[in-house]
Amino acid sequence: MKTQCDCDFVINNSVGLQAHYDNCSLTWSEKHPGKECPKNADGTVKLLNKHLLNLDVDILYHLGLDTLNYDLPAMFGDVKFVCMGGTKHRMREFAQYISSVLNLPRQGEKLVNLTKHSQRYAMYKVGPVLSVSHGVGIPSMTTLLQEVIKLLSYAKAKNPFIFRLGTSGGLNIPAGSVVVSSFGLSGDLKKSYSVPVLGKIRELPSFLDSRVCQEVHSLVSEDDDFNTYIGGTMAADDFYRGQARLDGPFCDYSETDKMTFLKTLTNLGVKNIEMEATAFSAFTREAGIRAGIVCVTLLNRLDGDQVTPSKATLTEWQKRPMVVLGRYIKQYVDAHTNNI
Ligand code: R2B
Ligand code: URA
């Protein structure tokens, strides 16, 4: 077993940062007792599911790709950052944005949706970045995420990151703020994702890589016209009652009940509410892939429930996670240009 640090740091200055990433081979067994490290010596993703060895071809149904008819290492072997977000349109925009941030050639060319055979999601590749939509909520997101994890493994992508860029409701912070998540909190206030497997509930811890979170946050600029916070993110399985709203079709609790609940969340260190954070953190952690969540808040939930800003404002705000993440990706690419 490898006992050396194999962190390929995006930010080398360690002041105020965790010493290692969560998937560092040196600290893996201490942080994940009794769990095999799902990473090969060359940094590629190791799938621990032995049943996959029995497949002659693995069909990534929702991506419209498979291991027989596509040369996945040639197509995706250089992927370093997978960035996912709810809508097809936003992820296309993100791909275009990253293309300009990295000053990639062929920026004006039409982007090709690489999942076009499946039509369920949209996926674009620009340089080392894969920009993919995941739809709304945990089942849609985890379906995509699990196929992306297999894709990264089959493509032999080295030491990849997976990020979610999203929208959310903020807790006690101004609308338009950005939150970099440190953990996912479930609707029943656990720092885990509960998923039934073979009729029994499994609870998977839902922490995100602390160093990635700190590194992303360290690139915040004083010139930004918005604040960026680090904090917990509650993932609800519902936009209305699941997020303590009073404006859904059903509601049998009072405004005081709602405010008490939101206060409980803030006391637990939660800064925003969305619909994927627990499962996203849990599955990327189980896969041994460094991950982060960067969301803009569309409203302050202590002030109300309806999303009232204009379309123009919402469009502008949704660029904020792209700007924050774009800096991180550029930082990596500038420092490792010869490795990608
Ligand atoms: C944030 O916004 C979406 C719901 O409007 C959902 O995908 C989420 O997490
Ligand atoms: N997305 C959510 O899930 N909740 C909000 O309040 C806003 C966006």
Image (tube, rainbow, N blue to C red):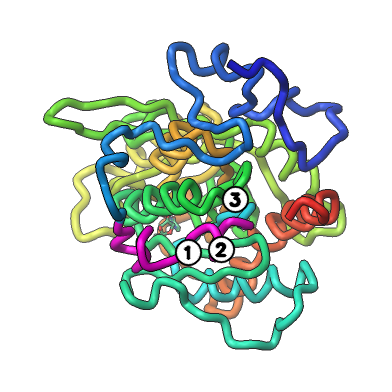
Of circles 2 and 3, the one toward us is 2
Question: Can you identify the residue that label 3 sits on?
Answer: 294
Mark 3: few, some, or many residues within 10 Å (few <14, many ≥20)? many
Judge by depth and name the residue closer to the eye, 42 or 173: 42
Give the amino acid type for the residue marked by disc 1 in the picture: Asp
Residue 107 occupies quadrant: bottom right
Residue name at image x 27 percent, y 26 percent: 202
In this rendering, the answer to whether 50 lies above or below 180 is above
Whether residue 58 is in magenta: the answer is no
Percent position of residue 209, x then y: 60, 33
Question: Can you identify the residue that label 2 sits on?
Answer: 74
Q: Is residue 58 left or right of residue 46?
A: left
Is residue 303 among what the camera can see? no
Residue 71 is labelled as: 1
Marks 2 and 3 sit apart, C-alpha to C-alpha, by 29 Å
Residue 239 occupies quadrant: bottom left
The secondary structure type at the circle numbered 3 is strand
Give the amino acid type for the residue marked by disc 2 in the picture: Ala
The secondary structure type at the circle numbered 2 is helix
**Badges 2 and 1: C-beta atoms under 8 Å apart?**
yes
In this rendering, the answer to whether 150 lies above or below 321 is above
Residue 47 occupies quadrant: top left
Marks 3 and 1 sit apart, C-alpha to C-alpha, by 31 Å
Q: Which residues are magenta?
A: 59-78
Judge by depth and name the residue closer to the eye, 237 or 56: 56
Ligand 1 found in image quarter: bottom left
